[in-house]
Image: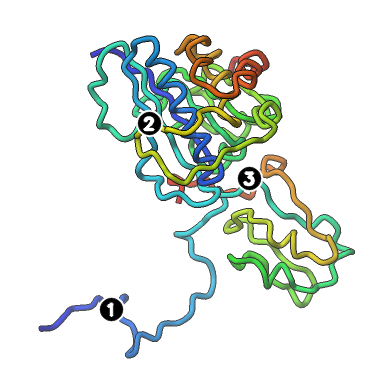
Protein backbone atom coordinates (compact mmCIF):
# COMPACT_ATOMS: atom_id res chain seq x y z
CA UNK A 1 0.00 0.00 0.00
CA UNK A 2 1.37 3.40 -0.84
CA UNK A 3 0.15 6.92 -0.34
CA UNK A 4 0.65 9.81 -2.67
CA UNK A 5 1.55 12.93 -0.71
CA UNK A 6 1.46 16.24 -2.56
CA UNK A 7 4.83 17.91 -2.75
CA UNK A 8 3.79 20.90 -0.66
CA UNK A 9 2.46 18.70 2.14
CA UNK A 10 5.59 16.55 2.48
CA UNK A 11 7.45 16.71 5.78
CA UNK A 12 10.89 15.46 6.66
CA UNK A 13 11.48 12.02 8.20
CA UNK A 14 10.50 11.99 11.85
CA UNK A 15 7.92 14.73 11.24
CA UNK A 16 10.34 17.54 11.88
CA UNK A 17 8.75 20.68 10.56
CA UNK A 18 10.14 24.19 10.68
CA UNK A 19 8.78 26.25 13.54
CA UNK A 20 6.33 28.87 12.31
CA UNK A 21 7.96 32.24 11.94
CA UNK A 22 5.77 35.15 11.02
CA UNK A 23 2.01 35.41 11.15
CA UNK A 24 -0.78 32.93 10.55
CA UNK A 25 -3.28 34.87 8.49
CA UNK A 26 -5.90 32.15 8.98
CA UNK A 27 -6.06 32.80 12.71
CA UNK A 28 -6.57 36.55 13.05
CA UNK A 29 -8.34 37.15 16.36
CA UNK A 30 -8.51 40.92 16.75
CA UNK A 31 -12.31 40.98 16.78
CA UNK A 32 -12.33 38.96 20.00
CA UNK A 33 -11.31 41.94 22.10
CA UNK A 34 -13.41 44.72 23.55
CA UNK A 35 -10.51 46.51 25.23
CA UNK A 36 -6.91 46.89 24.21
CA UNK A 37 -3.56 47.62 25.91
CA UNK A 38 -1.68 50.69 24.81
CA UNK A 39 1.59 52.38 25.73
CA UNK A 40 0.43 55.20 27.94
CA UNK A 41 3.78 56.50 29.05
CA UNK A 42 6.84 55.49 27.02
CA UNK A 43 9.21 57.20 29.49
CA UNK A 44 8.09 54.84 32.25
CA UNK A 45 8.86 51.73 30.20
CA UNK A 46 12.16 50.25 31.44
CA UNK A 47 12.21 47.42 28.86
CA UNK A 48 11.68 44.69 31.43
CA UNK A 49 10.00 42.68 28.61
CA UNK A 50 7.26 41.35 30.87
CA UNK A 51 4.63 42.07 28.21
CA UNK A 52 6.69 40.16 25.65
CA UNK A 53 7.14 37.21 28.02
CA UNK A 54 3.62 36.94 29.39
CA UNK A 55 1.60 37.50 26.20
CA UNK A 56 0.02 34.13 25.38
CA UNK A 57 -0.29 35.04 21.71
CA UNK A 58 3.13 36.56 21.11
CA UNK A 59 1.64 39.95 20.27
CA UNK A 60 4.50 41.94 21.74
CA UNK A 61 7.85 42.09 19.93
CA UNK A 62 10.97 43.85 21.15
CA UNK A 63 12.68 46.38 18.93
CA UNK A 64 16.18 46.21 20.43
CA UNK A 65 17.56 49.00 18.28
CA UNK A 66 15.02 51.65 19.27
CA UNK A 67 14.41 50.18 22.74
CA UNK A 68 10.63 49.92 22.38
CA UNK A 69 8.09 47.13 22.49
CA UNK A 70 5.72 46.85 19.51
CA UNK A 71 2.11 45.65 19.82
CA UNK A 72 0.50 43.48 17.14
CA UNK A 73 -3.12 44.61 16.83
CA UNK A 74 -4.13 41.80 14.49
CA UNK A 75 -3.74 38.95 16.97
CA UNK A 76 -4.33 40.54 20.40
CA UNK A 77 -7.45 39.06 22.00
CA UNK A 78 -7.55 41.71 24.71
CA UNK A 79 -6.76 39.46 27.69
CA UNK A 80 -4.78 42.41 29.13
CA UNK A 81 -2.27 40.20 30.95
CA UNK A 82 0.44 42.57 29.69
CA UNK A 83 -1.17 45.47 31.54
CA UNK A 84 -1.37 43.38 34.70
CA UNK A 85 2.28 42.35 34.46
CA UNK A 86 3.67 45.76 33.50
CA UNK A 87 5.87 46.58 36.49
CA UNK A 88 6.21 50.30 35.74
CA UNK A 89 2.54 50.86 34.81
CA UNK A 90 3.58 52.14 31.41
CA UNK A 91 0.79 50.15 29.75
CA UNK A 92 -2.86 51.00 30.24
CA UNK A 93 -6.29 49.82 29.08
CA UNK A 94 -8.49 51.62 26.55
CA UNK A 95 -11.85 50.84 24.95
CA UNK A 96 -11.57 49.43 21.45
CA UNK A 97 -14.05 51.95 20.03
CA UNK A 98 -11.81 54.84 21.11
CA UNK A 99 -9.61 53.93 18.15
CA UNK A 100 -10.50 54.11 14.47
CA UNK A 101 -8.52 51.07 13.35
CA UNK A 102 -6.70 48.02 14.65
CA UNK A 103 -9.44 45.41 14.23
CA UNK A 104 -9.50 43.22 11.13
CA UNK A 105 -13.08 42.69 9.93
CA UNK A 106 -13.75 38.98 9.50
CA UNK A 107 -16.52 37.00 7.80
CA UNK A 108 -16.66 34.41 10.58
CA UNK A 109 -16.22 34.69 14.31
CA UNK A 110 -13.20 32.38 14.36
CA UNK B 1 -46.61 31.64 4.45
CA UNK B 2 -46.90 34.03 7.33
CA UNK B 3 -44.17 36.57 7.87
CA UNK B 4 -41.72 35.43 10.54
CA UNK B 5 -40.19 38.26 12.54
CA UNK B 6 -36.55 37.47 13.20
CA UNK B 7 -34.11 38.96 15.72
CA UNK B 8 -30.38 38.25 15.69
CA UNK B 9 -28.36 38.81 18.86
CA UNK B 10 -24.56 39.26 18.90
CA UNK B 11 -22.76 38.62 22.19
CA UNK B 12 -19.24 37.96 23.41
CA UNK B 13 -18.47 34.28 23.88
CA UNK B 14 -18.54 32.77 27.40
CA UNK B 15 -18.69 36.09 29.28
CA UNK B 16 -21.97 37.20 27.68
CA UNK B 17 -23.15 33.84 26.42
CA UNK B 18 -25.88 33.38 29.04
CA UNK B 19 -27.00 37.01 28.79
CA UNK B 20 -27.24 36.76 25.01
CA UNK B 21 -29.21 33.55 25.31
CA UNK B 22 -31.45 35.31 27.83
CA UNK B 23 -32.31 38.03 25.30
CA UNK B 24 -33.45 35.50 22.72
CA UNK B 25 -35.34 33.49 25.36
CA UNK B 26 -37.09 36.54 26.86
CA UNK B 27 -38.35 37.73 23.47
CA UNK B 28 -39.57 34.24 22.60
CA UNK B 29 -41.19 33.54 25.96
CA UNK B 30 -42.83 36.99 26.06
CA UNK B 31 -44.32 36.42 22.61
CA UNK B 32 -45.33 32.93 23.66
CA UNK B 33 -47.65 34.51 26.25
CA UNK B 34 -49.42 36.31 23.41
CA UNK B 35 -50.13 32.98 21.72
CA UNK B 36 -47.51 33.44 19.02
CA UNK B 37 -45.32 30.73 17.55
CA UNK B 38 -41.76 31.30 18.73
CA UNK B 39 -38.22 30.00 18.59
CA UNK B 40 -35.04 30.86 20.52
CA UNK B 41 -31.74 29.15 19.87
CA UNK B 42 -27.98 29.55 19.60
CA UNK B 43 -26.01 29.59 16.37
CA UNK B 44 -24.57 26.12 15.93
CA UNK B 45 -21.62 27.35 13.87
CA UNK B 46 -20.38 29.64 16.65
CA UNK B 47 -20.23 26.86 19.24
CA UNK B 48 -18.28 25.88 21.23
CA UNK B 49 -17.56 29.49 21.98
CA UNK B 50 -14.38 30.90 23.46
CA UNK B 51 -13.86 33.95 25.63
CA UNK B 52 -14.59 37.12 23.66
CA UNK B 53 -15.56 35.47 20.40
CA UNK B 54 -18.59 37.09 18.71
CA UNK B 55 -21.45 34.57 18.98
CA UNK B 56 -24.99 34.73 17.60
CA UNK B 57 -28.34 33.91 19.19
CA UNK B 58 -31.63 33.96 17.34
CA UNK B 59 -35.31 34.62 18.10
CA UNK B 60 -38.26 34.08 15.80
CA UNK B 61 -41.83 35.22 16.35
CA UNK B 62 -44.71 34.39 14.05
CA UNK B 63 -48.51 34.48 14.03
CA UNK B 64 -48.61 31.14 12.27
CA UNK B 65 -46.55 28.01 12.58
CA UNK B 66 -42.92 28.65 11.65
CA UNK B 67 -42.27 26.63 8.53
CA UNK B 68 -38.52 27.34 8.41
CA UNK B 69 -38.00 26.21 12.00
CA UNK B 70 -35.10 23.91 11.09
CA UNK B 71 -33.11 26.70 9.36
CA UNK B 72 -30.28 27.30 11.76
CA UNK B 73 -29.53 30.89 10.74
CA UNK B 74 -31.83 33.88 10.51
CA UNK B 75 -32.14 34.69 6.84
CA UNK B 76 -33.79 38.08 7.11
CA UNK B 77 -33.52 39.68 10.57
CA UNK B 78 -35.57 42.82 11.11
CA UNK B 79 -33.66 43.69 14.27
CA UNK B 80 -30.09 43.09 15.41
CA UNK B 81 -29.11 43.39 19.07
CA UNK B 82 -25.44 43.92 19.93
CA UNK B 83 -24.56 43.12 23.55
CA UNK B 84 -21.06 44.62 23.39
CA UNK B 85 -20.40 47.79 21.42
CA UNK B 86 -16.96 46.71 20.18
CA UNK B 87 -18.45 43.81 18.19
CA UNK B 88 -19.55 46.29 15.48
CA UNK B 89 -15.92 46.95 14.64
CA UNK B 90 -14.81 43.42 13.80
CA UNK B 91 -17.63 41.63 12.00
CA UNK B 92 -20.59 42.28 9.69
CA UNK B 93 -23.39 42.33 12.25
CA UNK B 94 -26.04 43.30 9.68
CA UNK B 95 -25.56 40.19 7.56
CA UNK B 96 -28.68 38.90 5.77
CA UNK B 97 -30.62 42.08 6.58
CA UNK B 98 -32.61 43.06 3.49
CA UNK B 99 -35.42 45.33 4.60
CA UNK B 100 -34.78 48.51 6.55
CA UNK B 101 -33.92 47.16 9.95
CA UNK B 102 -33.27 48.19 13.53
CA UNK B 103 -29.95 48.02 15.36
CA UNK B 104 -29.90 47.97 19.17
CA UNK B 105 -26.50 48.55 20.75
CA UNK B 106 -25.40 48.36 24.37
CA UNK B 107 -23.29 51.50 24.52
CA UNK B 108 -22.72 54.72 26.40
CA UNK B 109 -21.67 56.46 23.19
CA UNK B 110 -23.92 58.46 20.85
CA UNK B 111 -25.31 56.71 17.76
CA UNK B 112 -22.93 58.53 15.38
CA UNK B 113 -19.90 56.98 17.11
CA UNK B 114 -21.29 53.51 16.50
CA UNK B 115 -22.45 54.12 12.92
CA UNK B 116 -19.01 55.17 11.71
CA UNK B 117 -17.82 51.59 12.29
CA UNK B 118 -20.65 50.07 10.20
CA UNK B 119 -19.88 50.31 6.47
CA UNK B 120 -23.27 48.89 5.40
CA UNK B 121 -25.34 51.20 7.60
CA UNK B 122 -27.62 51.99 4.62
CA UNK B 123 -29.49 48.82 5.56
CA UNK B 124 -30.68 50.44 8.77
CA UNK B 125 -33.86 52.34 9.40
CA UNK B 126 -33.04 53.31 12.96
CA UNK B 127 -30.43 52.74 15.63
CA UNK B 128 -31.20 52.35 19.32
CA UNK B 129 -28.55 53.12 21.93
CA UNK B 130 -29.00 52.03 25.54
CA UNK B 131 -26.40 51.91 28.30
CA UNK B 132 -27.32 48.48 29.61
CA UNK B 133 -24.02 48.14 31.46
CA UNK B 134 -24.88 51.19 33.54
CA UNK B 135 -28.54 50.24 34.10
CA UNK B 136 -27.80 46.67 35.17
CA UNK B 137 -24.57 47.67 36.95
CA UNK B 138 -22.60 45.57 34.48
CA UNK B 139 -24.11 42.36 35.85
CA UNK B 140 -23.61 39.35 33.62
CA UNK B 141 -24.83 35.96 34.71
CA UNK B 142 -22.60 33.10 33.62
CA UNK B 143 -23.94 29.64 33.04
CA UNK B 144 -21.95 26.94 31.30
CA UNK B 145 -24.74 24.42 30.93
CA UNK B 146 -25.66 25.62 27.44
CA UNK B 147 -29.16 25.39 26.08
CA UNK B 148 -28.82 24.46 22.38
CA UNK B 149 -32.42 25.45 21.86
CA UNK B 150 -33.81 24.06 25.10
CA UNK B 151 -35.61 26.17 27.66
CA UNK B 152 -33.36 27.84 30.17
CA UNK B 153 -34.46 26.70 33.61
CA UNK B 154 -32.42 29.29 35.49
CA UNK B 155 -33.41 32.93 35.92
CA UNK B 156 -34.00 35.00 32.82
CA UNK B 157 -32.93 38.62 32.54
CA UNK B 158 -30.97 39.11 35.76
CA UNK B 159 -28.21 41.13 34.09
CA UNK B 160 -27.64 43.34 31.05
CA UNK B 161 -30.12 41.34 28.97
CA UNK B 162 -33.12 43.00 30.66
CA UNK B 163 -32.47 46.64 29.61
CA UNK B 164 -31.46 45.50 26.11
CA UNK B 165 -34.76 43.66 25.63
CA UNK B 166 -36.57 46.75 26.92
CA UNK B 167 -34.84 48.90 24.30
CA UNK B 168 -35.45 46.33 21.57
CA UNK B 169 -39.20 45.97 22.11
CA UNK B 170 -39.58 49.73 22.36
CA UNK B 171 -38.15 50.07 18.86
CA UNK B 172 -39.67 46.99 17.24
CA UNK B 173 -42.96 46.60 19.11
CA UNK B 174 -42.71 42.86 18.66
CA UNK B 175 -44.02 42.01 22.12
CA UNK B 176 -46.11 43.88 24.69
CA UNK B 177 -44.08 45.30 27.57
CA UNK B 178 -46.35 43.66 30.18
CA UNK B 179 -45.72 40.20 28.76
CA UNK B 180 -41.98 40.77 28.82
CA UNK B 181 -42.15 42.05 32.39
CA UNK B 182 -43.77 38.81 33.53
CA UNK B 183 -40.82 36.80 32.18
CA UNK B 184 -37.89 38.89 33.40
CA UNK B 185 -36.35 38.78 36.89
CA UNK B 186 -34.92 42.31 36.97
CA UNK B 187 -38.13 44.17 36.06
CA UNK B 188 -36.72 47.51 37.14
CA UNK B 189 -33.79 47.25 34.71
CA UNK B 190 -36.15 46.25 31.91
CA UNK B 191 -38.38 49.25 32.53
CA UNK B 192 -35.37 51.57 32.67
CA UNK B 193 -34.03 50.15 29.41
CA UNK B 194 -37.43 50.75 27.84
CA UNK B 195 -37.58 54.32 29.13
CA UNK B 196 -33.96 55.36 28.58
CA UNK B 197 -33.37 53.87 25.12
CA UNK B 198 -32.46 56.57 22.61
CA UNK B 199 -33.95 55.85 19.18
CA UNK B 200 -32.33 57.73 16.31
CA UNK B 201 -33.18 57.53 12.59
CA UNK B 202 -30.35 56.57 10.22
CA UNK B 203 -29.88 58.63 6.99
Q: In percent of the image, x 55 and y 13: which residue is there?
A: B170
Circle 3 — which element?
loop
User: Do discs 1 and 2 share a chain?
Assistant: no
Relative side of A83 to A32, left or right: right
Q: Position of residue B68 (x, y in %)?
A: 25, 25
Q: Classify mark 2: residues with Cα within 10 Å, few (<14), some (14-19) or many (20+).
A: few
Secondary structure beneath dot 1 equals helix
Q: Nearer the viewer, mark 3 or mark 2?
A: 2
Residue under numbered circle 1: A7
The quarter holding residue B72 reads top left
Which residue in the structure is indicated by mark 2? Answer: B151
> Which scheme is used to colour this image of the protein?
rainbow
Identify whether A74 is placed above or below B35: below
Chain on which label 2 sits: B
What residue did someone put label 3 on?
A34
Q: State whether discs 1 and 3 lie on one chain.
A: yes
Query: Compared with residue A53, is residue B201 higher up or lower down, i.e. above or below?
Result: above
Of all residues, the one furthest to the left in this rendering is A1
Q: Which quadrant would the N terminus of chain A be assigned to in this image?
A: bottom left
**Mark 3 belongs to chain:** A
Amino acid sequence: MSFIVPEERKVAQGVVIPSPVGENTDMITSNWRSQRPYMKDLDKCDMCRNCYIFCPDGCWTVDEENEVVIWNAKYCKGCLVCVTECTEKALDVADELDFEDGVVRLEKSF
Amino acid sequence: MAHVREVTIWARGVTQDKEGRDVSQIIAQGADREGKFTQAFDDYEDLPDRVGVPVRKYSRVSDEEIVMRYDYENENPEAVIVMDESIVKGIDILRHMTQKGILVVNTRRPAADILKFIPNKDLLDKIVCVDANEIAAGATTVDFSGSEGGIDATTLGAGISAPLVGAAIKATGMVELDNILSVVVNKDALQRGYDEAVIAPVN
